[in-house]
Each structure stands twice: as structure tokens, then as C-alpha cells.
Image (cartoon, rainbow, N blue to C red):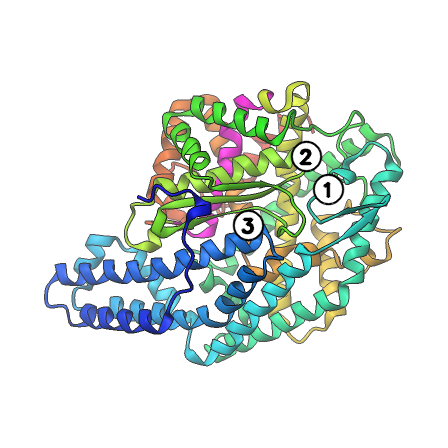
């Protein structure tokens, strides 16, 4: 394993022509392998080639997202947007060779069935005819990232970006909150025309790809892109119904109690992020002090987490603080050839700093735990299962929150659990919105905004945009990056949240057993499907009728609603 730190990781643009020649040569070896061990060796060589491309992409992408104004890595990102889609053909050819192999049964015994189930779904996601559309979507994604990363929002003579303005939206002075939130949404209003154009073009391109691949619309292709092998839109619709019936009423009571605590007649859009009259829970100390306490926390949680967090620090595999020109949001990725996860975040002095540090650490711990899983597909599970690790880690670290929040600790606990409940209806609104949009791809911008207003009425009836013209027109969705970059991802957070609640409840009852199940889940990586991983961890299937209600009833006791 590499001993270098991330700043020293070498970046070199991959020679795709040379790699494609090598890939095709190994692919032929897989197809013509006389013995099982030759077929396994070919799979391992193919993994090595694909990992080298992924490594280059991720190093470049991390450095680009740390500074979207860096011209070199911006150009490299543009190059990947243009050229990486050609490697989709490699993937499809490889999966076809696996599925057609005379050694298929023995390969399944060696690698497990998930690789082959995934391959069956994945070969339906690409043909050369959609290459230009993939390139165009990548280019639009980069433009959207660049647009948001370069946001400059003026408040009281100071300039903020979309990450650093958040603390201003949480101050006690209501007029100051309104001023900051209005300024942020005015930025979106000023850029609305281009944002809507970007999304409209994405919908058109994705629909074209789906049609060329034989789907009725993009929904089927979107699910295949998410590698969903054991559930479909019907199960997701039933899950959303359960959220509407059992979670939305609880969320509404939470908003009513927030309004009562704040002593106001109505919760306006600029009030939503302000939870307590005495102020929101805030982490104590500097970013360096927060990281130092996180180090102590992970040392005490378990030997595995302690060693791993020290590894992240020693190898400089985290960039946590908000900076000008930095892409908004947070993520974790994996640099294959260095077997190193990387955590990207935007600390801004709010409790979200701690949420993202625990959340993204959960992702990182999982992929590090399964880094030796083979084939390459098994390093990560599908997104739905991956979010279980991250969201559950937020709960496993509860005993150490006092070191972050001091006197605000109890407020943090309440805010975190309440926020988890409030998120579920929003996540389902985002998901159903996308289903409706891609089922009706000929809608214009006004039609899509009208659908979002329907979703707000259905899942988020507390919202009051009466004094903001832009938001009143159903435009809030335009701030949600996942809608643009990873269609149909967002429901995965909701499914995982129900699973994470279960880990939280089990951890209270028997920490050792809950933690052992969590580590077992992490080590399994992507070697099983979502529902198989849920079963492996001893969790209840969130799709089954009654599960959402059961979990909601147990969790609401902590909220007094």
C-alpha cells in the first residue's frame, strides 16, 4: 500500500487508447480461458486496468472540487467528461463476457452471485449510440458544479458562498436570518434561467438515452444505473406511501413545536433552519480542535475506527473546511491504487460539520473495511446500502457528542433525531418529483415547478413561501444537486435512514452486538444486494408494510410528539 500522502499522489491523465488495447487483450483471454484459474486471472487483470482509470479520475476530481478555479484540474475534469464515457463500452463488454463464460457457474461460486446479478442489470445501461448524450450530460453536470462552486452572495458588505452563508441563516435575529436566506435564494433566482435550461437539457438527453436502449422512459434506465437488482419503482412507491402515512404527521408536529418554541405565528422559509430560541447547537472549538476530538472519539469507539481515523489524518485524506472556489457539499470517494478513501466537506461552524464528519467517515470506514474485496465491484455496495453505513455511524458516535457540543449536547441530540425525521418526507418528495419528471419528459420548466409544488403540498405542507416570489413558484428543487447529478439517488438516504434508526435502537440495547453487526456489514462491501445486506446485518426490510410505522413509533418517544 502506498506510503505517500494525498498531496503527493501522482496524477497522470490516462492513455485510454493504450489501456483499451490492453483491456481488449485481457478480455479475449477471459473469453477463451480453458481453465477456471485463467478466467479468474483475467478478471483480476481487468480490475487492475479499470482501477487505474478510476484512480486518475478521482485524484483529479478531488483536486478540482477543492478548488473549482484551478485551471489545470478544471481542464482535466472537462477531459474526463468528454472521454470517460467510452469506458462504458469496456464495462458492458466485460459483463457480457462474464455472463457468456463457459466457466460462469464456477466463477459465480468463486466471486458470488452479486457480480453476475449486477452484470445482468448493467449491460442494459449502455450502447455506443448513447455516447454523445453521456458526454453532454457530463458537461452539463460540470457546468452546474462550476456555477454553484463560484456563487458569490453579498450580505452586509461581506461575500459568502453557498456553504459559508449557512450560519447566517441560523442566527437568532429573525431579520438577519431573512436577509441572509433571501440573499441566497436571490442568487438562485438570478441564475434560475440557466439552472432550468441545464436540467431541461439533462431530462431531454436522459430520455433520449433511455429510448435508444429500449426503455419506455428514463425511470427504468435510472434504476438500472443505480444497480438495483432486488426492488423496483413499485416497492419504492409503497415505501413513500408509508412515509406519508407514518412520518409526515410526526414531522408536522415537530414543525409546530418549533414554531411554538420560537414564539411566532408562522414558520417562514427563513425560520426553518433556526431550531431553538437560545440558538442552534454549535460545535465548540476550531476545526483543528474538532478533528482532535474526533480522533479521541474514534480511538475509543473501537480499535478499527481509531487506527483508521489516524490513517486518514497521517495520509492527509480529508479536506474539511469551506473555502472560496470550493465545490459545495460533502462526499467520500475511494482512490483504488492507493487503497485510500478520501473525505471532502465544507465546515461552516454549524452542527452539520459534525454530521458530515461522522457521516462521511462511515462511508470511508466501510470502503476501507472492504478494500480487499474482489472483484472491484465489491469495494462499494450500491448507494442504498452504502448510506446505511454513513447514517448509522452518526448514531454510533452519540456517546462522544458532548466533546463537540458541550452545553448544547442535549439540543444536538434532539435536533439530530428530529432532523432525521424531517428529512424523510423531503427525500421522498425529491424521489417522487423525479419519477414524475421522467415519466413526463415533455413538460416545460413551469410544468416541472408545478410538480414540485405538488410534492411540497403532499410531503412538506408546513412550507410557507408566501413572501418569496421565487420559491413560491416551486423552484426549491433547483438547489438539490443530486437531482441533477445522480437521478434517483435520494430515496437511498430514506431507505438507509430507516435502517440506521434500527442500528441506533439496537446500540442502546446491546452495543457490542450492534457494533459487531455493523462491522460485519462494512466488511461485506458490495458482495451482496441491498436486501441481502439488510438481512446480513439483522435489520428489518424497510419496504415491508409495518416496518416504517414500527420504527417511527419507537423513535418518536425521544421527541415527545
Which comes sooner in the sequence, label 2 or label 3? 3
Estimate the spatial distance between the alpha carbons at disc 1 and disc 2, rounded to whole Å.
8 Å
228, 239: nearer the viewer = 228
304, 446: nearer the viewer = 304
Secondary element at tag 1: helix
Which comes sooner in the sequence, label 1 or label 2? 1
Q: Badge 1, how many Cα within 10 Å: few under 14, some, many 20+?
A: many
Measuring from the top left, give residue 350's x and y in whole percent. 68, 34
Stretch in magenta? 380-402
Q: Which residue is mark 2?
A: 350
Secondary element at tag 3: helix
Identify whether 149 is placed above or below 514. below
Measuring from the top left, give residue 76's x and y in whole percent. 51, 64
- Asked whether residue 239 is in view, the answer is yes
For marks 2 and 3, give the one nearer the viewer.
2
Estimate the spatial distance between the alpha carbons at disc 2 and disc 3, rounded to whole Å.
31 Å
Measuring from the top left, give residue 59's x and y in whole percent. 46, 54
6 in the magenta segment: no
Identify whether 67 is placed above or below 387. below
In the picture, the quarter occupied by the N terminus is top left
Q: Which residue is mark 1?
A: 166
Residue at image position (47%, 38%) is 362
**Residue 419, quarter of picture:** top right
**Prevalent SS, magenta region:** helix
Which comes sooner in the sequence, label 1 or label 3? 1
390 in the magenta segment: yes
Amino acid at each position: 500500500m502506498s506510503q505517500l500522502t494525498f498531496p503527493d499522489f501522482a496524477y497522470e491523465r490516462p492513455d485510454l487508447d493504450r489501456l483499451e488495447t490492453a483491456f481488449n487483450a485481457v478480455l479475449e483471454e477471459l473469453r477463451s480461458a480453458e481453465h477456471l484459474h485463467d478466467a479468474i486471472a483475467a478478471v483480476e487483470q481487468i480490475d487492475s486496468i479499470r482501477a487505474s482509470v478510476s484512480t486518475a479520475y478521482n485524484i483529479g476530481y478531488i483536486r478540482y472540487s477543492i478548488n473549482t478555479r484551478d485551471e489545470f484540474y478544471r481542464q482535466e475534469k472537462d477531459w474526463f467528461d468528454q472521454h470517460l464515457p467510452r469506458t462504458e463500452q469496456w464495462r458492458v463488454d466485460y459483463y457480457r463476457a462474464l455472463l457468456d463464460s463457459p466457466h460462469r457457474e464456477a466463477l459465480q461460486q468463486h466471486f458470488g452471485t452479486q457480480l453476475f446479478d449486477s452484470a445482468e442489470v448493467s449491460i442494459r445501461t449502455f450502447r455506443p449510440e448513447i455516447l454523445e448524450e453521456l458526454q453532454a450530460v457530463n458537461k452539463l453536470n460540470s457546468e452546474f458544479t462550476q456555477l454553484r462552486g463560484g456563487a458569490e452572495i453579498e450580505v452586509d458588505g461581506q461575500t459568502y458562498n453557498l456553504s459559508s452563508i449557512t450560519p447566517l441563516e441560523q442566527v437568532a435575529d429573525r431579520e438577519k436570518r431573512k436577509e441572509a436566506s433571501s440573499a441566497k435564494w436571490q442568487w438562485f433566482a438570478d441564475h434560475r434561467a440557466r439552472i432550468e435550461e441545464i436540467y431541461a437539457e439533462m431530462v431531454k438527453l436522459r430520455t433520449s438515452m433511455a429510448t435508444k436502449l429500449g426503455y419506455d422512459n428514463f425511470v427504468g434506465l435510472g434504476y438500472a444505473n443505480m444497480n438495483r437488482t432486488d426492488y423496483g419503482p413499485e416497492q419504492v412507491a409503497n415505501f413513500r406511501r408509508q412515509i406519508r402515512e407514518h412520518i409526515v404527521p410526526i414531522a408536522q408536529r415537530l414543525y409546530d413545536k418549533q414554531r411554538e418554541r420560537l414564539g411566532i405565528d408562522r414558520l417562514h422559509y427563513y425560520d426553518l433552519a433556526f431550531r431553538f430560541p437560545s440558538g442552534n447547537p454549535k460545535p465548540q472549538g476550531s476545526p483543528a480542535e474538532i478533528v482532535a476530538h474526533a480522533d479521541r472519539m474514534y480511538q475509543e469507539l473501537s480499535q478499527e475506527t481509531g487506527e483508521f481515523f489516524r490513517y486518514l489524518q497521517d495520509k492527509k485524506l480529508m479536506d474539511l473546511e469551506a473555502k472560496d472556489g470550493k465545490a459545495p457539499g460533502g462526499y467520500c470517494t475511494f482512490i483504488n491504487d492507493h487503497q485510500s478513501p478520501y473525505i471532502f466537506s465544507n465546515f461552516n461552524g454549524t452542527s452539520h460539520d459534525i454530521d458530515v464528519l461522522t457521516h462521511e467517515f462511515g462511508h470511508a470506514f466501510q470502503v476501507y473495511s472492504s478494500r480487499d474485496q474482489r472483484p472491484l465491484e465489491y469495494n462499494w455496495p450500491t448507494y442504498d446500502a452504502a448510506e446505511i453505513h454513513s447514517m448509522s455511524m452518526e448514531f454510533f458516535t452519540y456517546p462522544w457528542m458532548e466533546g463537540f457540543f458541550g452545553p448544547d449536547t442535549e439540543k444536538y441530540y434532539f435536533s439530530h433525531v428530529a432532523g432525521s425525521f424531517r428529512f424523510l418526507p423531503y427525500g421522498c418528495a425529491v424521489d417522487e418529483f423525479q419519477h414524475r419528471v421522467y415519466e413526463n419528459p415533455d413538460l416545460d420548466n413551469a410544468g416541472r415547478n408545478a410538480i414540485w409544488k405538488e410534492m411540497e403540498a403532499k410531503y412538506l405542507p408546513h412550507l410557507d413561501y408566501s413572501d418569496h416570489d421565487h420559491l413560491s413558484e416551486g423552484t426549491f428543487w433547483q438547489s438539490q444537486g443530486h437531482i441533477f447529478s445522480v437521478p434517483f439517488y435520494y430515496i437511498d438516504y430514506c431507505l438507509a435512514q430507516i435502517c440506521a434508526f434500527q442500528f441506533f435502537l439496537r446500540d442502546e440495547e446491546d452495543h457490542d452486538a450492534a457494533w459487531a453487526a455493523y462491522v460485519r456489514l462494512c466488511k461485506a462491501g458490495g458482495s451482496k444486494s441491498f436486501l441481502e445486506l439488510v438481512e446480513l446485518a439483522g435489520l428489518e426490510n424497510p419496504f415491508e408494510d409495518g416496518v416504517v410505522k414500527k420504527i417511527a413509533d419507537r423513535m418518536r418517544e425521544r421527541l415527545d410528539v
